[in-house]
Image: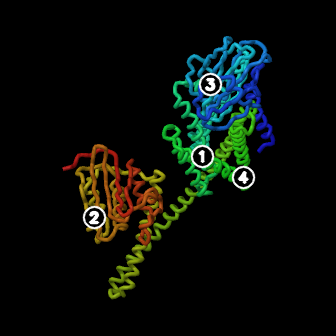
Amino acid sequence: MKRGWPGLLLLLCWLPMWMAMAASAHAAPVSLEGRLEHFADASGELPFEAVSQADFVRSRFVRLPAFRSLGYGTDTHWFHVELGPQDGSPSHRVLAIGSPELEELDVWVQRQDGSFEAHALGYHRSYEGRPLTRLSALPLDTFPGMHIYWRVRTTNALSVYAELLPAEDFTSGETRANFFHGLYFGILLIAAALYAILGARLLDAVMAAYAGYVASQLLFHLGATGYLPVLLAGRSVWLMDALPRIGWLGAAAFIALMWDRLLQLKATHPRIHRLYMFTVALNLVLLFFALQPALVTSTVLLVVKAANYLNVLNFVVAMGLLVQTWRHDHRAEWMVYLIAFVIPALGALVNTMTNQGLLPWNAATAHFYQIAALVHVLVMSYGLALRLRQLQQDKAAAEQETAIVTQRAQQQRHFVAMLSHEFGNPLAAIDRAAQMLQLNLQLHAPHLPPKDVQRLALIRGNAATLSGFVERFLMTEALDNGALSLSRTPCRIRQMLEDAVRQQPADLRSRIHLLECSEGTFEVDSTLMGVAIGNLLANALRYSPQNSPVEIGATLGDTGLRIRVADQGPGLDADELDKLGAPYFRGAAALGKKGSGLGYHFTRRIVEAHAGTLTAQSGTDTGLEVEIFLPGSAKSTPR
């Protein structure tokens, strides 16, 4: 890694912090920190008229020393503040109450005549009749001694803070906050789209999974910052709650998938791979309950907690594997990934401690989670840029290696072709000499011992086998290089099949059953097509049980000619079927049987030279069925 990268990371870290501080820097606020009084109503049924009594306030409300979360719970919480003469002017203010995730917020504001005006605010409340802002805000005409009460019902952390601002300062502050939050969400949206495109274009599961993770984080933060009710105009409470849950669960699933692919766990750590796949499946199952909250039970909540602990475990394991991998090959991107994910982990820790009341609420703790998420994306972008460069280098190296292998293979094939060509004449000479020797011995030594006769026959048989192999190889080489031209002539379809049957050994012909065979003629190279059909028949006879039938048939349709050969042999499994046709490949059933592995390959080349296709269907213990399809039209049958 270059020396300048720490400075770049420092700049990336400072930029979002400056943005957050600028977003939270409202002009001349009057903070109510240290002045709020609090009461927790466990029953949740006390009305405002009872709570607002002076005796009740003096006896039941407790002064809160600072803005600090009261944690999670099911109680209804009341807050009270009395404005004093120190609040000063102007009298026209805006009361802003946070956090943005408070679902139900009811506010009672005292008028000059001592009566109270009620307002229904909150994340779940309609935005009609109140300012379209992500915060719960009310315009007030304040006066010394003014009493303000509000009641909070929420399932989120009870993080409540409040401040009074001049109207123009509130507007300018919210404008700045909206600008910086828009910039923040814009960066996340661009990152998600960019990595989705790169993942699809490069077929890289790591970048595609990370795109899903960033998109999920975008959904979650839209809810956490209170922008979803603004975007949806408060019209769908279900959707406002569902989208952040989708973001939370989706982020957990996508990040587990990304780590699994990034660290290649299936090959390197199979057990951890299974753990991560279980995490992905578990979060997808919980997604169903996130979309159907009515089905959530105490058991489901326990599973949710277990899933959160599992996500933490996955994070710790991934960080350990990143360190281990970096120690192994010392590639810079592994440390970048480590730094990138430690940052949001710290953000989540600060956010959790703030929500639990262990840390006070202030501008730093309130925005730390979002800042950490943005810095994470920026740092991770640098790491993925290194990955992209490595992928390009690996691709270039693979292409170069492929070119070298292809060149070597071509040179080897040329050498073998030349060698095979040179073998042709000596083999023919050996066969002629053995044949002449047989004739002379029959004339001059008719009582030659049977073993010597068998040896001569074996010499001729092996020479013929080797000659056939050389001939097939040379013809395949010619077909592969386009050096063998076809001589198409109209051929009678039935006669072509019968000729191919007659080419088989006499003792095996009785096993071949000629089934349906269309009449008429079809233009093919009769010599090559006869060899192709003969190869299929020979394979079917060789690899099927003795006395089992081999079927052959041909049908001529509007689109072309179909020739089918089927046996009742052991068949091929899916892996062998995929490899069928590769030069020199022989299936498990071919063990102990003669053959070169070129017959089917040669047949495929002949069929492809006719612009046709060769397909095979099989299953274990169901035999093999091979079909030749030759496109074209029928010719009239000669009389």
Q: Mark on residue 323?
A: 4
Label drawn at residue 625: none
Does 575 sit above or below residue 433?
above
Q: Are marks 4 and 2 in contact (CB under 8 Å)?
A: no
Q: Residues under labels 4 and 2: Cα distance?
A: 66 Å
Q: Are marks 4 and 1 in contact (CB under 8 Å)?
A: no
Q: Residue at 56% of width from left, 40% of height from top?
A: 200
The residue lying toward the viewer, choosing from 170 and 491, is 170
Crowding at dot 1, Cα within 10 Å, few <14 / some 14-19 / many 20+, comes out as few
Q: CA distance from mark 1 to mark 3?
A: 38 Å
Side of 464 relative to 256 (left or right): left
Q: Which residue is mark 2?
A: 512
Please, what is the three-letter code of the amino acid marked with disc 4? Val
Q: CA distance from mark 4 to mark 1?
A: 28 Å
Q: Are marks 1 and 3 in contact (CB under 8 Å)?
A: no
Q: Which percent across, then down, holds residue 470?
A: 45, 64
